[in-house]
Image (cartoon, rainbow, N blue to C red):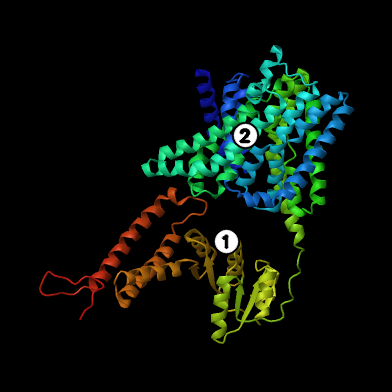
Amino acid sequence: MTEFLFQATLFLLAAIVTVPIAVRLGLGSVLGYLGAGILIGPVLGLVGTDMTELQHFAEFGVVMMLFLIGLELEPRALWDMRDRLLGLGGAQVALTMATVMIATRLLGYDLSTSAAVGMILALSSTAIVLQTLSEKKLMASNGGRSAFSVLLTQDIAVIPMLAFLPLLAGGALTAADDHAEAAHHGPELLGILQSLPGWALALVTVAAIAAIILGGRFLTSPVFRIINRTGLRELNTAASLLFVVGVSSVMLLVGLSPALGAFLAGVVLANSEFRHEIEADIAPFKGLLLGLFFITVGAGINFTALFANPISILALTFGLIAIKGSVLFGLASLFRIHGRDRWLLTLSLAQAGEFGFVLVSFAVNTQVLPLELSHTLLLVVALSMLFTPLLFILYDRIAHQLDDAAIPPLSPDTIDAQQPIIIAGIGRFGQVVHRMVQLSGLKTTVLDHDLKTITLMREFGFKTFLGDPTRPDLLIAAGLKTARVLVVAVDRSEDAIKLVTHARRERPDLFIVCRARNREHAYALFAAGANKIVRETFDSSVRAGRYVLEGMGLTDFEAATQAETFWKHDRHSVLELAEYYKPGVPISENEAYKAKAEELKDSLETAILMTRAADYEPVDGPGEEKPLGQDKT
């Protein structure tokens, strides 16, 4: 127990250091957890190679993850996925097994060993892939849904694989003592089934699944209602955890995958009124245990064996990724998954998975795999999982290139009219300005780089030109040399600053009106030379505040007066603070700015109080005043 707590403490401390760094660098949390395990395991040697207890504990995170996924899927939704589950998922498992078997046979291994290796390497990492898909918000995409279908099929396929592996050794289930250390999953997975005949095993399995379905359907709701009446949140959390632990234990006892059982239980509870409450209670534990699982994977990588034969180990790892990627890419084309979704499916599932550790141990325990080959397989599985975040980074780059390639470069329009007002950017903000100016009888030259927006404006009869407003040549063509007013309403803040800087340099006398995202953007635009700046949400927020005052009983005049006082003071403070703003220096570290802001805050409070005092008048005698908002009759 002491060693368990020591290992867990080290893992958590390492994760606190490495995970934020990995996330900040855009590598994802999974790579950070794997890095934490590598750091305190193979690199620093702070933990030994025996992490059996911690691995059992951490693997429960995978179980809870699949339970939460099941909560998000109604049985009808699962039925709607049957084509992908049976078609895409089944084809991936079968074709990958066959391809890996052929490759293993070419390396000189016998048929039974090749079949075992094919089953082991056909599986992908449910934990890493689903965690990364969720972080990158890709689960709702076609590629994400397809990847989930394949992963679910793989988890289901673990059951027949566990039943078939002993047959490769002639049906013997003898667990040799010298192989016991490699079989930390064996006792749980075999459980009480070692002494049962085949027909009894089938009955026990069906009974266990039926118990989970019926219990989840009819027993959980009354139990959770009773617990909710106590008003104790910790009891609800305990009941949620007990339910997942109980389901997993039942599945282990009958030799089935606890993760699959938890998923089934989640699907059963998907229509429960307590679904969201259960999800909120379990989610924090899921994240923590999944992190521990990834750390144990990183700590378990045998770098000694890797460095002893790096070329062959890496060749096997990249060969596995290439084989699985090729199969997935071909199936994606067959199932009409195109573009970035095809690459997402291909690269996200090209690794081996955590169930590979289970099957390797089980295969060694049943004397299907030689011990030396099992060590190599464990290393290949771990390394392929370690490379998975890098494959997602590769996907991001490919997807970005595909997006750029999907939008052909557009040639800017030839600008054949020059007006006294140039509007750069015709989004929601620019459209309002444009309509108001045109209703006043003034002419404008509108320039925007978005073809869809330009097309829409033309459909409504407005003459607009396609082109990048930040390009100096297009600005000259639009009439920068002769225009009187430039309206800068482009989307990107840096483009607005670039445009104002260039326009002010070319035309010191030009009147420039800009849209700013926030105060800091406003300061930068003032520094660039803008005359008037409108913060995009400021005026609407002041109007909303005025409505609040009216709702509290102030008259229209009183609310308007205070809104005008606030508006004028804030506009003045922006001009004042712009002189103290230093680009690149955080406001929290700019002492002069903070001091001036505090001074302006005090002056605003004084102005508001003076405004309110002017709206009070004596009632019934000296010393009594009439509150704001009451009728003055």
Give left or right: position of 112 versus 77.
Answer: right
At x 31%, y 63%, the residue is: 603
> What amino acid type should be assigned to the residue bearing mark 2?
Ala
Q: Are circles 1 and 2 on residues that touch, CB within 8 Å?
A: no
**In x, y percent, where is residue 626?**
19, 72
Q: Is residue 590 above or below residue 536?
A: above
At x 21%, y 79%, the residue is: 632
**In x, y percent, where is residue 169?**
79, 21
Q: CA distance from mark 1 to mark 2?
A: 63 Å
**In x, y percent, where is residue 290?**
58, 35
Q: Is residue 151 visible?
A: yes
Mark identifier at residue 493: 1
Q: Nearer the viewer, mark 1 or mark 2?
A: 2
Q: Is residue 22 visible?
A: no
Neighbor class of circle 1 (other Cα within 10 Å; few <14, some 14-19, many 20+) is some
Q: Quadrant of residue 424?
A: bottom right
Question: Could you tell me which secondary element the residue under label 2 belongs to?
Answer: helix
**In x, y percent, where is residue 514?**
54, 69
Question: Could you tell me which secondary element the residue under label 1 belongs to?
Answer: helix
- State the residue in front, 448 or 283: 283
Give left or right: position of 63 versus 545.
Answer: right
**Between discs 1 and 2, the one toward the N terminus:** 2
Q: Quadrant of residue 550?
A: bottom left
> What amino acid type should be assigned to the residue bearing mark 1?
Ser
Which residue is tagged 2? 207
- State the residue in front, 364 or 445: 364
At x 77%, y 54%, the residue is: 338
Q: Residue furthest top?
A: 177
- State the residue in front, 269 or 384: 269
